[in-house]
């Protein structure tokens, strides 16, 4: 459910016509809906009511400060993967004791920043990282609270680039090495193991892989207890999918119910790290048709948004629904919707049936709120798009459109 709806023949973002936004702020333009973000966060978080839990929004999905502030105001913790994300989360007012820090390559300076901030825990992904965190914590005169990211070797049945919990992936530690890592903690003066963690992949459209991973983690928990190691937290990562096209992912309540059944009587606080399910359908990318052209094999809609603005179609072959902002009765044609970038891989859709729109018309690319702007770049020296947050009839410029000066600002 989201708040981008057609009313009186035009697309609205909550109470504001999208044409008015494009007219005032230009295109390409990201538009986020505050009501949708709120609804998604609350629906997700309340799905686990009855379980002692903390929902840590995964900052990488959409890290705009206005979005983070909104979610922090709703009580969200945050899942971060870099010093930059820590900086954003703290600026957004998230309490440090609600921040978990994942990622395979945390640098010593980033570890120190997180220790100084007093985060809830580091999700450690290798023995080398464990030793480095112990060393940095020692220098800082602190004890780092940690969990290990266990790679349960479960196939999440999603795109290979966003599968993370299989043996061949770079993430986490396999079960036997994890046991050894927990054992090692006893000899490390500046480490306190407090949890266990896993994240098996993203855009999962079924509960089964989560449950398979959970079973393996609970079995592991039993082995830890046998070794006399007590922990308090069970971090299950993120990964719940959304509808881009015709996927029917489980509702968070289904996930919540399944967890409650497995975790009754287990004295662990559950941490969840949802990203896409909160932000994905809370944002659209608005773009203008710059030119249309046809050759004997293809019809092209050349639009002013490109792979630098939204890379998902180019990188993963992802589907994003594209529709007119002001729909009209007309024939439909099969189009490639492409951007101005000098690469054949620069497309938002391929062989897509769309109404035969004209130059100058606006299109909305749906489900662009997660992994949209955060994966954008300046490739082809394209200033990054403007981001708006709409709340009812109030529009906030969440990030100004970049200028040409911004492009060279850091250069000699
Ligand atoms: N926790 C960890 C440790 C993660 O690595 C991720 C995502 C999440 C949580 C949040 O997962 P979510 O709930 O959003 O599925 N760029 C790709 C997605 C990459 C996901 C990376 N990790 C895409 O556009 O599909």
Image (cartoon, helix red, strand yellow):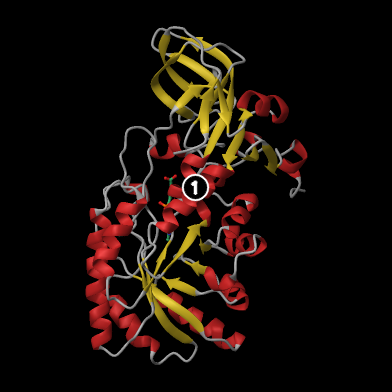
Is 88 rendered above or below residue 100? above
Residue 369 location in percent, x, y? 52, 42
Residue 305 seen in the figure: no
Q: Residue at x 46, y 13 (%)?
A: 355
Q: Nearer the viewer, residue 215 or 41?
A: 41
In the rendered view, tell whether residue 397 sits above or below residue 326: below
Label 1 CB, ligand 1: below 8 Å?
no
The residue shown at (53%, 47%) is 37
The reply, left or right, for residue 245 in relation to residue 16 is: left
Q: In front here: 3 or 298?
A: 3
| Residue on which the image places disc 1 | 39
Q: Residue at x 44, y 65 (%)?
A: 104
**Residue extending furthest toward the front:** 50
Q: Quadrant of residue 289?
A: top right
Locate the N terminus and report the quarter of the image it occupies: top left
Crowd around label 1: few <14 · some 14–19 · many ≥20 (10 Å): some
Q: How many marks?
A: 1
For the point 37% across and 38% down, the residue is 243
Q: Is residue 233 left or right of residue 390?
A: left
Q: Is residue 72 left or right of residue 133?
A: right
Horizontal side of residue 216 vs 280, given as left or right: left
173 versus 278 height, above or below: below
Residue 371 percent coordinates (x, y): 49, 45
Residue 330 versus residue 251: which sits nearer the camera? Answer: 251
Image location (x, y in percent) of residue 295 = 45, 9
Q: Position of residue 222 (x, y in %)?
A: 23, 80
Q: Secondary structure at mark 1?
A: helix
Q: Tell me if I can see residue 122 in this picture.
A: yes
């Amino acid at each position: 459910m989201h708040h981008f709806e057609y009313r009186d023949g035009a697309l609205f973002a909550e109470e504001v016509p999208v044409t008015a936004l494009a007219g005032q702020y230009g295109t390409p333009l990201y538009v986020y809906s505050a009501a949708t973000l709120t609804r998604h966060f609350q629906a997700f978080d309340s799905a686990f009511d009855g379980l002692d839990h903390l929902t840590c929004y995964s900052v990488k999905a959409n890290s705009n400060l206005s979005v983070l502030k909104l979610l922090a105001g709703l009580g969200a913790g945050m899942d971060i993967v870099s010093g930059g994300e820590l900086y954003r989360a703290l600026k957004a007012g998230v309490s440090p004791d609600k921040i978990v820090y994942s990622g395979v390559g945390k640098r010593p300076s980033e570890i120190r920043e997180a220790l100084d901030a007093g985060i809830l825990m580091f999700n450690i992904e290798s023995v080398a990282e464990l030793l480095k965190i112990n060393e940095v914590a020692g220098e800082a005169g602190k004890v780092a609270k940690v969990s290990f990211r266990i790679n349960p070797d479960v196939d999440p049945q999603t795109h290979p680039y966003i599968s993370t919990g299989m043996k061949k992936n770079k993430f986490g530690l396999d079960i036997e090495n994890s046991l050894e890592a927990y054992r090692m903690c006893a000899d490390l003066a500046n480490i306190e193991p407090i949890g266990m963690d896993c994240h098996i992949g993203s855009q999962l459209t079924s509960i089964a892989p989560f449950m398979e991973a959970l079973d393996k983690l609970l079995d592991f928990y039993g082995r830890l207890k046998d070794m006399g190691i007590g922990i308090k937290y069970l971090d299950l990562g993120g990964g719940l999918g959304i509808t881009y096209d015709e996927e029917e992912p489980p509702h968070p309540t289904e996930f919540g119910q399944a967890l409650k059944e497995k975790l009754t009587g287990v004295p662990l606080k559950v941490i969840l790290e949802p990203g896409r399910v909160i932000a994905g359908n809370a944002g659209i990318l608005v773009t203008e048709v710059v030119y249309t052209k046809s050759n004997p094999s293809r019809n092209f809609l050349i639009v002013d948004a490109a792979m630098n603005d939204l890379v998902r179609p180019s990188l993963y072959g992802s589907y994003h629904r594209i529709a007119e902002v002001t729909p009209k009765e007309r024939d439909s044609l099969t189009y490639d919707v492409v951007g101005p970038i000098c690469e054949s891989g620069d497309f938002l859709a391929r062989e897509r049936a769309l109404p035969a729109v004209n130059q100058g018309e606006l299109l909305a690319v749906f489900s662009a709120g997660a992994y949209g702007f955060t994966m954008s770049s300046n490739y082809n020296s394209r200033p990054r798009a403007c981001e708006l947050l709409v709340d009812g009839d109030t529009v906030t410029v969440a990030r100004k459109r970049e200028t040409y000066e911004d492009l060279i600002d850091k250069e000699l």
